[in-house]
Image (tube, helix red, strand yellow):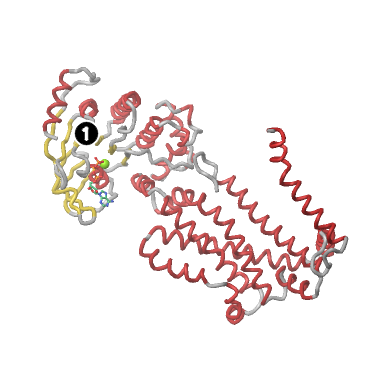
Amino acid sequence: MPRLRAVADRFGAPLSFLCVLALWETSCRLRWVSPVLLSAPSRIVASLASLMGSGALTGDLAATASALLLSLAIALAAGGALGVGMGLSQPTFRLIHPYLVSLNAIPKVALMPVLVLWFGLGLPPKVFLGAFMGSFPIAMAAYGGVRSLESDLLMMARSFGAGRMMILREVVLPGLLPHVLPALRVAANYALVGVLIVEFFAADRGLGYRIIVYSSNFQTEAFFALLLLVAAMGLACASTVGFLERRLVRWPGEERA
Amino acid sequence: MSLVIRDLSVRRGDLAVIDRLDLEIAPGEFVALTGPSGCGKSTLLNAIAGLVPLAGGAIEAERGSLGCVFQRPMLLPWRTVLDNAAFGLECRGASVDDARSRARTFLEKVGLGRFTGYFPNELSEGMKQRLTVARAFLVEPRLVLMDEPFSSLDETARRELQDLVLDLWAKSKCTVLFVSHYLEELVYLADRVIVLGPRPTTVVKTVPVQLRRPRGIGNEGMLGLMESVQRCR
Ligand SMILES: Nc1ncnc2c1ncn2[C@@H]1O[C@H](COP(=O)(O)OP(=O)(O)OP(=O)(O)O)[C@@H](O)[C@H]1O
Ligand SMILES: [Mg+2]
């Protein structure tokens, strides 16, 4: 039945999603689960709408978003520089790579006490942890990108007398884009987790902070509304990077991740 | 002299690749270079291009720009045909607009005018090498180094590109140093064939090719010369 197959392919996923939503809604409405534990989807959306509408979340949203963007910018610069450095020089790689791997292996939550000690509260510790967590995937991708860059291309450029800036701008960076942009997607997720962790434990504003407040007050609907907001933030990052990829990496023969 | 190499030695790591090589090339001369595989032909070209350090001796090249064509096309996959052709000019400091407009005119002349908007991955191997030849000659080089540029092409494409190179060379009056394994190609193109010995390499023999152009494949003189190059390889 190829017809049925096509229909299932097209509508299967949205249909099953609707089913899950319906089941969830029903079980909450009929009180199969306690409203303290789980809120109905309709109530979550309504709660999110009213929270956003009242402006109650504006400050928190701004705090988290600015920390996230700042983290990502720093992760891109620092991770990119580390990765390119490691890729261009094997001694640098041997020097830096062990630190990167062992630092990345630390469970980040364990850093919380010392982060507060070093940076206090507010923006700095969030940006530190976000950038710290975001740098790793970017550094590794930039490293891989430089290594896979044909050294012949560098040679060709030098044979025409290209200077360092020309080589960096016209050969190295475009060659890195298809590697670094997919990593940026991952890095955005990591950085968001980093920012939220700090907001959970050591902040007086931000979506993470709000999540903790609502959940400890058993404001379940608002809590889930915030989860939805955070998920939307992650999605927004991913689709922004996807947009960049489509705009910047569009020569034929380059497989997109 | 356009290029004078005196007592040149080059090492790659622990390996002595070129050993006390002497070579003089006159301005406007077309010199072909051949020798056993792995003897150091590419290393010699790279040394002339300043891409590898010298272990001894000296290379003096006429002032002016250099055009290189390598065995593989070495095109930038994110640049179009037009922008790849313009790359050499940009490297030499031309503005992007200027480089592009000169590249466009030149691509027209070498038969790539219809493909300026294509990307390298959309071209045949022959077209790719045609583009790299254009890129090299666009910088108005005094010296062109070509390292087995057509060895991976089929017969027809190779013939066409050989004639293109001869044409561009004759018009620009530049000096060409052309590495090849193909006897026929060596004798078809060059004013002089230089045979290198096994590694560590040096010049073993020079065979002047005093045949009028255009040369034909069946030309008797060519066959004789091909034999004499073959004998000392
Ligand atoms: N970057 C490098 N590092 C170490 N050794 C090298 C390097 N490049 C070349 N060599 C060595 O130098 C020698 C000469 O290499 P080269 O590529 O110049 O030879 P070739 O004459 O061009 O050979 P072919 O005919 O196969 O192109 C080879 O033994 C090669 O292994
Ligand atoms: Mg070679």
Task: Give the left or right position of residue B168, taking residue A14 as reference.
Answer: left
Residue at the image position 71 percent from the left and 57 percent from the top: A232
The image quarter in which residue A98 lies = bottom left
B166 left or right, relative to A127? left
Three-letter amino acid code of the residue under disc 1: Ala
Q: Is residue A86 left or right of residue B164?
A: right
Name which quarter of the figure residue B89 lies in: top left
Residue B25 rendering spot, x and y as whole percentages:
19, 37
Q: Which of B54 and A183 is in front in this view?
A: A183
- x, y percentage for residue A107? 56, 72
Name the residue nearer the viewer: A12 or A54: A12
Chain letter behind tag 1: B
Q: How many marks?
A: 1
Vertical comparison of B146 with B199: above or below: above
Q: In which quarter of the image is ligand 2?
A: top left
- The residue that label 1 is drawn on is B32
Of residues A5 and B157, the one drawn nearer to the viewer in this rendering: A5
Whether residue A256 is visible, yes or no, is yes
Q: Where is residue A106 in the image (x, y as percent from the top left)?
A: 53, 72
Asked which secondary structure carries label 1, the reply is strand
Instruction: Check the image and name the residue furthest to the bottom.
Output: A117
Say above or below: B48 vs A24: above
Instruction: Please rate how many residues cluster around mark 1, counting C-alpha atoms within 10 Å: few if below 14, some from 14 to 19, many from 20.
Output: many
**Does any portion of residue A53 appear in the rendered image?**
no
- Residue A175: x and y in percent read 47, 49
Q: Write the residue at 69% across / 75% down.
A: A203
Q: Is residue A45 above or below residue B34?
A: below
The relative height of residue A234 versus residue B201 in the rendered view (above or below) is below
Looking at the figure, which quarter contains the N terminus of chain A? top right
Q: Which residue is drawn at 18% across and 52% down?
A: B16
Residue at image point 16% right, 26% down: B226
